């Protein structure tokens, strides 16, 4: 937590009381990330900022590398995130390798290659849609053209993302022509909707990258004149979100599992404000994205990154 964030939290607590500024939870105890050193039928070794860490693999351990995989398909040196079984720091429940996600608005198309604007404070993303994934991608993205929304999960291939799975269904009209959303009533500090994830480290978990295990969330309704920053491109969010500032702490509950955490707002989630989609998990009818969790926080709260989302309740103050 930065000094500025600490000052903001202390000021909020002084003005509104301690419940309005809870202390964020510490790093997740059962989620680990690093570069793969070695993997075999019974043991996986990662190079993490705290040194090498070994995990026991069981018959129940599930692997994902662009799809359901086996341990021998993982490659030494690639980015791996491990979630351990509840109550354990060393028995791997799920293992993901090379995870990548691109969320935003398409700005250019050249055959099976796309460029996607991912928000005013993030670099554009280069995407390739392999032929084998093109059918299911077009089912949920009826128009893969400049100006249309795009959200897909895949794996890294150098600096390019190979998009393999559409995260959710997107509308058949450009983002700029979305139906006008009603004015948001911001009285409530509790709202339900969908949360997605993003990777602050962009798949680069090697070399002790401090962003690799960053916890918190990017928020789609930061104050436009201050924390959203220069070139703010956020839209009116589909969900009735309260305005928050960087450094604020919210309580987020996974409505599918019941897991909860106090998480800080660490970035602007302007890209998420353009989406008015629905997560099919838990049969929720709520539309709109209430937050983009960092990858580490999403996994720690029980999310499956390849599913793209879960339904949650966000409480601020």
Image (spheres, helix red, strand yellow):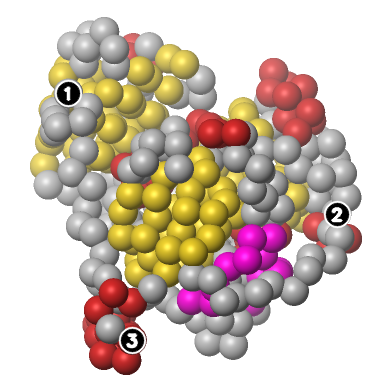
Image coordinates of residue 148 in percent, x first then y, are: 80, 51
Magenta stretch contains residue 203: no
Q: Which residue is mark 1?
A: 91
Magenta stretch contains residue 236: yes
Is residue 28 shown above or below 263? above
Q: Is residue 62 left or right of residue 176?
A: left
Q: Quadrant of the C terminus?
A: bottom left
Nearer the observer, disc 3 or disc 2?
3
- Start-end of magenta stretch: 232-244
Label 1: few (<14), some (14–19) or many (≥20) C-alpha neighbours in 10 Å: many
Is residue 103 shown above or below 24? above
Q: Residue at x 49, y 70 (%)?
A: 189
Name the quadrant containing residue 117: bottom right
Label 2: few (<14), some (14–19) or many (≥20) C-alpha neighbours in 10 Å: some
SS for dot 2: loop
| Residue 107 seen | yes
Image coordinates of residue 134 in percent, x first then y, are: 74, 25
Number of marks in the rendered image: 3
Q: Which residue is mark 2?
A: 174
Of the residues under marks 1 and 2, which one precedes in the sequence?
Answer: 1
SS for dot 3: helix
SS for dot 1: loop
Q: Which residue is mark 3?
A: 16
Q: CA distance from mark 3 to mark 2?
A: 42 Å
Q: Which residue is at the front of the view, 182 or 53? A: 182
Q: CA distance from mark 1 to mark 2?
A: 46 Å
Q: Which residue is at the front of the view, 1 or 212? A: 1
Image coordinates of residue 64 in percent, x first then y, are: 43, 23
Q: Residue at x 14, y 32 (%)?
A: 87
């Amino acid at each position: 937590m930065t000094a500025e964030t600490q000052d903001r939290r202390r000021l909020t607590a002084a003005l509104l009381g301690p419940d309005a500024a809870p202390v964020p939870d510490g790093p997740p105890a059962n989620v680990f990330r690093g570069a793969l050193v070695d993997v075999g039928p019974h043991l996986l070794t990662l190079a993490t900022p705290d040194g090498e860490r070994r995990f026991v693999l069981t018959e129940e351990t599930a692997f994902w590398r662009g799809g359901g995989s086996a341990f021998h398909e993982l490659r030494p040196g690639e980015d791996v995130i491990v979630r351990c079984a509840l109550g354990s720091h060393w028995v791997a429940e799920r293992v993901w390798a090379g995870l990548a996600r691109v969320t935003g608005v398409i700005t250019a198309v050249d055959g099976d290659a796309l460029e996607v604007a991912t928000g005013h404070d993030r670099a554009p993303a280069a995407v390739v849609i392999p032929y084998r994934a093109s059918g299911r991608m077009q089912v949920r993205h009826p128009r893969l053209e400049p100006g249309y929304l795009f959200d897909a999960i895949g794996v890294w291939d150098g600096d390019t993302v190979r998009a393999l799975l559409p995260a959710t269904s997107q509308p058949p009209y450009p983002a700029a022509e979305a139906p006008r959303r009603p004015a948001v009533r911001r009285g409530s500090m509790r709202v339900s909707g969908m949360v997605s994830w993003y990777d602050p480290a962009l798949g680069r978990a090697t070399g002790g990258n401090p962003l690799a295990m960053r916890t918190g969330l990017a928020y789609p309704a930061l104050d436009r004149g201050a924390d959203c920053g220069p070139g703010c491109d956020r839209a009116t969010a589909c969900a009735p979100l309260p305005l928050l500032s960087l450094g604020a702490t919210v309580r987020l509950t996974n409505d599918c599992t019941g897991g909860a955490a106090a998480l800080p707002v660490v970035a602007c989630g302007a890209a998420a404000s353009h989406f008015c989609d629905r997560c099919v998990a838990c049969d929720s009818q709520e539309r709109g994205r209430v937050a983009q969790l960092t990858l580490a926080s999403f996994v720690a709260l029980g999310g499956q990154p390849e599913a793209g989302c879960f339904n949650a309740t966000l409480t601020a103050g």
